[in-house]
Image (spheres, grey):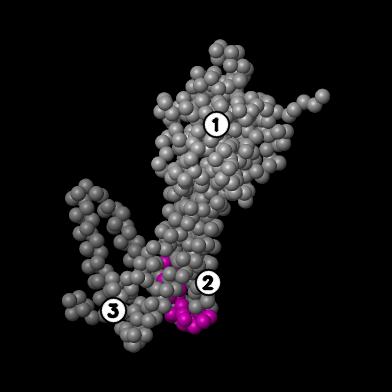
Amino acid sequence: MTTELPVLRTERLGRSIGQSLLVSDVTIEVPRGEVLAVVGPSGAGKSSFLRMLNRLDEPTSGSFSIEGRDYKEFLPRELRQSVGLVMQTPFLFPGTVETNLQFGPAQRGRALGPQEINSLLERVGLLGYERRDVTTLSGGEAQRVSVARALANDPVLLLLDEPTSALNEEAKMGVEQLLLEIVHASHLTCVVVTHDRAQAARMADRVMVMEAGRMRKIGTVAEVLGA
Amino acid sequence: MLKHWFAGHLALGLAQAALAASVALVVMFIARRRSIHLEKDISLALIRGIVQITAVGTVLVLLLRGPRWTGGLILLAMIFTAAMISARRVRTIPHAWKVSLYGILAGAGSVIALMSLAGVIDSAITALVPVGSMLIANAMNANSLALERFRSDVQAHVGQIEAALALGAVSQVSVFPYAQASFRASIIPAIDNLRSLGIVWIPGLMAGMVLSGSPPVYAAVYQFVVIAMIFSSSSLTCLVSTSLVRQNVFSEADQLLLRPSAHVAQ
């Protein structure tokens, strides 16, 4: 019998800048298909933790691995293609929706065909939007494009950094529902940072609570949030 | 009017300097009446300016009498100084001094060398140094504009740059649009100089050549030659510096280093 390696494993992962400690000693495992929510107050180190997993920021202590492979064994851009990141603000590139979807694969010298574009847009509920200029999109639509853009790289791990906090209430529920459908339909492994405990309860299998850069608690939604 | 009162060159020069400085002082008093206090800055700058330019002028007189090879040394010293001045504007860019030095060396340095070898710039020290200094000074200004624009554009677009990085873009690709925009912005003055030559401004070099007895048409054509060289050296400088600076704003692991100080994730 073989035990499947966790998609994400962190070992005493930490980051500090000078005397300022942003994240300290976080050790977790996220198995394939699990959604882990990271909750905590503002300034708890949630986003810093997530940025290290995409290597936008460098860990200063500890380590992490993706499917058993240490992060230092990847080229940074190779790791970032395997670990998708959806930010709080979509930050779409100028041009059409299709330009944005083609960006990630183009970095590997690959072009998505029309069927792949349609399939991605269908997954985020924007079928027929490929020629739309990104400046004409609503906040919710722009965030859906940024989700599709991350999925275009076919990541093994998807990181969501407060993906709905910049949206209005109506768009927020739509995007959250969409993310849930995508994650469950694709059996995608996901780490979602949110300050909204109710959202964490709706989306996650397990919840990690961070405070002052440290992991205070980790467990099932019921164990941690009592939901 | 002053020429009637002051016979010698030195006396006339000092009188002209005093008159020009007094105009600056009048501006200073007008500013003071509007509660803008520039007294210390302007007074110091005026004193520093006259002492500095007189000292440099004296040293130049000695150097210009030296052998031809000293011209190259003078220009090299000017390039080093220009790189230091340019880099001071963008202290937040890592290794900005090296980027500026390589840019100005490659841009102004190579155009000066090539044009001297081709005989477009007279290799006599009295021609080489003044013409070379014009190329270096303009390359320095263009380089400062390019790096400053690049710095501000990158700091204003951290989100887009990190979004590109997060999707697996090579660091240099993620800042390419900002390097391109910086280059375009930096060569606007050089292009405008070419466009407006003879219409909006008649540069000092041409006036000097005519005064010293050169045929006016040759003086005009040579002025075009100098402005064209300024355009080439400035553009080449900025091409090199905007290419080099793209590498300098990232860590070895392609993480953006040039971020506004407040932009730290929690």
Seen in the image, is B14 located left or right of residue A127?
A: left
In the image, residue A81 above or below residue A181: below
Q: Which residue is mark 3?
A: B9
Q: Chain of mark 2?
A: B
* Viewer-nearest of discs 3 and 1: 1
In the rendered image, the residue lying farthest to the top is A226
Residue A133 falls in which quadrant of the image?
Answer: top left
Identity of the amino acid at label 3?
His
- Of tags 1 and 2, the one toward the viewer is 1
Q: Nearer the viewer, residue A157 or B33?
A: A157
Q: Which residue is mark 1?
A: A160
Above or below, comparing residue A199 to residue B6 in the picture: above
Q: Look at the numbered disc 3 and give the secondary structure of its residue.
A: helix
Residue found at x 42% / y 66%:
B138
Q: Which range is magenta?
A: B116-138
Can residue B68 be seen here? no
Q: Is residue B44 visible?
A: yes
Residue behind mark 2 = B110
Give me the disc on residue B234.
none
Q: Is residue B131 magenta?
A: yes
Crowding around mark 3 (Cα neighbors within 10 Å: few <14, some 14 to 19, many 20+) is few
Closer to us: mark 3 or mark 2? 2
Q: Identify the chain of the residue marked 1, using the numbered disc in the image.
A: A
Q: Chain of mark 3?
A: B
Q: Is residue B14 magenta?
A: no
Three-letter code, disc 2: Ser
